[in-house]
Amino acid sequence: MEAGGSREREARNYLEKHQIMELLKYLTSVLLFIRPEKPREYLIAILEKLRIAKATGVAFPFFMDHSNIAAMFDMMDSSKKGTISFVQYKEALKTLGLCTADEVLKDDGHAITLDKFKSEVCVRPASLQAFARKS
């Protein structure tokens, strides 16, 4: 029984060390949001860009433009107030792979506007450089 537990622990450590689960979550989120006509080719293209970013030290590409970000915000803003809650904001960042579940984000008590959401989503892809550096 211990051997099985040891293998599980080794597997978990391997996945954590190489941030595989974060990468898969990011790829899945982008795939479901963009919904490309040819998903396999799209994923291959993303992974190729990641490989190039790692090899050249060039910034990791982010795959959402401002219209995608605005559409995502509109889906969360079901009451059409022009704001979303901090909880929605944090969940969106986690879904996009732009923050981890244990990352502490400061809630200043204010609702999140589209402008703030856009600026945060556009700034945070720099954190995805970890995939390119650690892969």
Image (tube, rainbow, N blue to C red):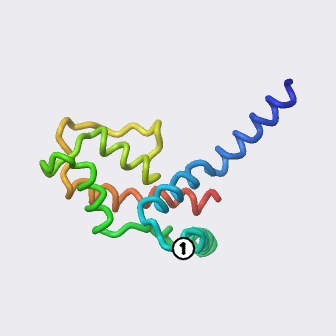
Q: Amino acid at mark 1?
A: Lys
Q: Who is closer to the viewer here, 86 or 106?
A: 86
**Residue at the extreme top:** 1
Of residues 119 and 76, the one nearer the viewer is 76
x, y percentage for residue 68?
Answer: 32, 65
Quadrant where the N terminus sits is: top right
Image quadrant containing the C terminus: bottom right
Q: Residue at x 70, y 40 (%)?
A: 13
**84, above or below 109, in the image:** below
Residue positioned 51% across, 61% down in the render: 129
Q: Secondary structure at mark 1?
A: loop
Rendered location of residue 66, percent (x, y): 29, 68
Residue 121: x, y in percent? 34, 57
Which residue is farthest front? 37
Left or right: residue 16 versus residue 49 is: right
Residue 107 pos. (x, y %): 26, 37
Q: Residue at x 31, y 61 (%)?
A: 69
Left or right: where 3 falls relative to 60: right
The residue nearer to you, when weighing 92 against 80, is 80
Q: Residues within 10 Å of mark 1 (few under 14, many from 20)?
A: few
Q: Toward which corner of the image does residue 5 lie, by quadrant?
A: top right
Residue 37 drawn above or below residue 95? below
- Look at 64% across and 44% down and name the residue there: 16
Q: Is residue 85 left or right of residue 15?
A: left
Q: Residue furthest left?
A: 81
In the rendered view, would you say 31 is above or below 51? Answer: above
Q: Is residue 12 left or right of residue 101?
A: right
Residue highlighted by disc 1: 38
